[in-house]
Amino acid sequence: MEHILCSTLLTTYHNEYQDVCAGCDMAGVVVGKGDSVSRFEIGDEVYGNIQNFTKDKIKQPGTLTEFIVVEEELVARKPKKVSFEEAASLPVALQTAIEGFKTAGFKKGQSVFIVGGAGGVGSLVIQLAKQLYGASFVTATTSTTKVEFVKSLGADKVVDYTQTRYEDIKEKYDLVYDTIGDSKNSYVVAKEEAPIIDITWPPSNPNAMHSSLTISGEVLEKIEPYLENGKLKATIDPASPFHFYEVIEAFSYLETGRARGKVVISPFPSIHEDEFL
């Protein structure tokens, strides 16, 4: 198995893996490579989710570092029109979003109800449903302050969960895609026999389907055209990027549940570093 050495420019923190690693995604530049590496050259800009699991154990630590050794099959070339900040925010969320549609067997022309439309995964599920999978109608839930943001992602209808209960929604959907682990309640908007995807483990609804995650640079390569033409866009929380010395603050902010999209951490000085010094 061949590796490349990357200068890690940006990374994202993932709450679901906090007990075992800090950071799964990265975006950086190749500064060294093994003799048998064939896909990349020194100087290539790459991004990916480097946390490959083997028998439920992570093979290497997180991405909160300036340099990291990466298995070449786990990363892809960074799209030219995507910034390092945007690239670092995408891999895990994008791979998760795609896997859910595959697991559900989603078909063009079907409708989807997305729980958690403003989150890192949910914001991509909305865009993928419209731009890649040809959904006929997309509804997503969010809080009051994020309604307009979720509309801007392409949702046909946005449900403010602080004002509307699942039981009050009259429409029924071909797929319920739950990104926040509320499938024990959100299932009521699904059509009879319709699949319910819950990306949390274990799903709160025993009848929900949990999709396994395929960690591969190939997934990112296939989606590259949509990132280059702007049909698929990264969503980064306005508070990002945080600097390395602000890692604790970044973790704390993410755990408030107020983040919109992804939280990004950078090893480079922020514009506020003079305040720190």
Image (cartoon, helix red, strand yellow):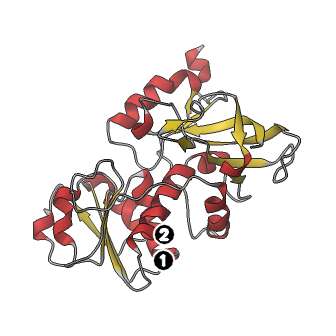
Work out whether residue 13 can be spotted: no
Per the image, label 2 sits on a secondary structure element best described as helix
Q: CA distance from mark 2 to mark 1?
A: 6 Å
Position of 268 with respect to 58 (left or right) is: right
Q: Which residue is mark 2?
A: 128
Q: Which of the labelled discs sits on residue 216, or is there none?
A: none
Seen in the picture, residue 21 relative to 228 is either above or below; the reply is above
Q: Position of residue 80 (x, y in %)?
A: 74, 58
Q: Position of residue 57 (x, y in %)?
A: 50, 36
Mark 1 closeness class: few <14, some 14–19, many ≥20 residues within 10 Å: some
Callout 2 amino acid: Leu
Q: Residue furthest left?
A: 167
Q: Position of residue 238 (x, y in %)?
A: 48, 44
Pointers 2 and 1 in contact (CB under 8 A)? yes
Per the image, label 1 sits on a secondary structure element best described as loop
Q: Position of residue 146 (x, y in %)?
A: 33, 55
Callout 1 amino acid: Tyr
Q: Which residue is mark 1?
A: 133
Q: Quadrant of residue 154?
A: bottom left
